[in-house]
Amino acid sequence: MVLKVYLEAFLNLLYPHHCFSCKKSLHREGAKYLCESCRQAISYIRGIRCPRCGVGLGEYSLIGRDGCMECRGDKLRFDGALSATYYEGVIKELIHQFKYGRHDFLVNPLAHTLLEFVGKDAPLPSNIDRIVAVPLHWKKRMERGFNQAELLASRVARYMRVDLSTGGLQRVKETLSQSNLPYPRRKENVSDAFAVKRPREFEGRNVLLVDDVLTTGLTASECARVLKNAGAKKVYVLVLARSKRDQV
């Protein structure tokens, strides 16, 4: 037993192999990114959910064609949203390291979490013609080195066998982080922030818009607005994680 502990410590020194959430060594478990306890702690969105904004709802919540009580008044421009998890705990830590720690390889477990869930518990729309990621402004992309939403979107496109648009939708205005703004300023922040550069890619097509996190839905809604103005028929949203209503 003591020898195993020393061996594990030696392996960690030569080749750090730890859980990206709790930092526990994974040499003993044989896992690659997350230990089993952290994997089990992921907060999936299960049960009844709003078909418009994707938020999880209680058993007795009222849902109409236009969505739940909260999103009906938001005038969201997309036609439906689907989220795999809540933006908290393990997933929040992984996304933070993915984006701000510049660990682009974490797209692998994150995309697996997303696709495994939506493939079984919440089927994706079957009529998607084109996939596109929520774009970053070029300054932010240069600073980070990659667009996390685009990396996720590439995995989704491969899984669904649907063409991925790269550069067809662009962020033309440098915006502030939505999470740092009060709700009334968030809509103004993303207003006219996006533009479609190649309308032919979306004209007459049903589009799946992919992002890592959805909070109020206003960024995705603005993307959907310009895509529809460019001729897209329907725009659906797929995200790895979304905030709970009390976190918005």
Image (spheres, grey):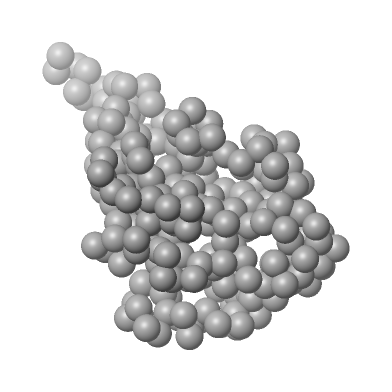
The percent position of residue 88, horizontal first and vertical second, equals 28, 51
> Looking at the picture, how far across and down is residue 142, in whole percent?
60, 71
Instruction: Count the marks.
Output: 0
Q: Where is the C terminus found, in terms of image quarters?
A: bottom left
Relative to residue 39, is residue 65 depicted above or below?
below
Tell me the residue at 29%/21% (across/down).
28
Whether residue 164 is visible:
no
Classify residue 210 as left or right of residue 68.
right
Query: Which residue is farthest top?
Result: 1
Residue 48 in the image, given as x and y percentages of width and height: 35, 40
Considering every residue shown, the one lying at the far left of the view is 2
Q: Nearer the viewer, residue 2 or 54?
A: 54
Q: Where is residue 13, by image quadrant? A: top left
Name which residue lies at 31% across and 22% down: 29
Residue 39 can be seen in this image? yes
User: What is the quadrant of residue 67 in the picture?
Assistant: bottom left
- Where's the N terminus, which quadrant? top left
Q: Is residue 106 above or below residue 98?
A: above
Query: Left or right: 183 with respect to 233?
Result: left
Q: Is 161 situated left or right of 73 in this image?
A: right
The residue closer to the viewer here, 226 or 12, is 226
Picture residue at 19% right of the left edge, 23% below the top: 5
Q: Nearer the viewer, residue 111 or 132?
A: 132
Q: Position of residue 114 (x, y in %)?
A: 48, 40
Q: Residue shown at 38%/45% (left/top)?
A: 49
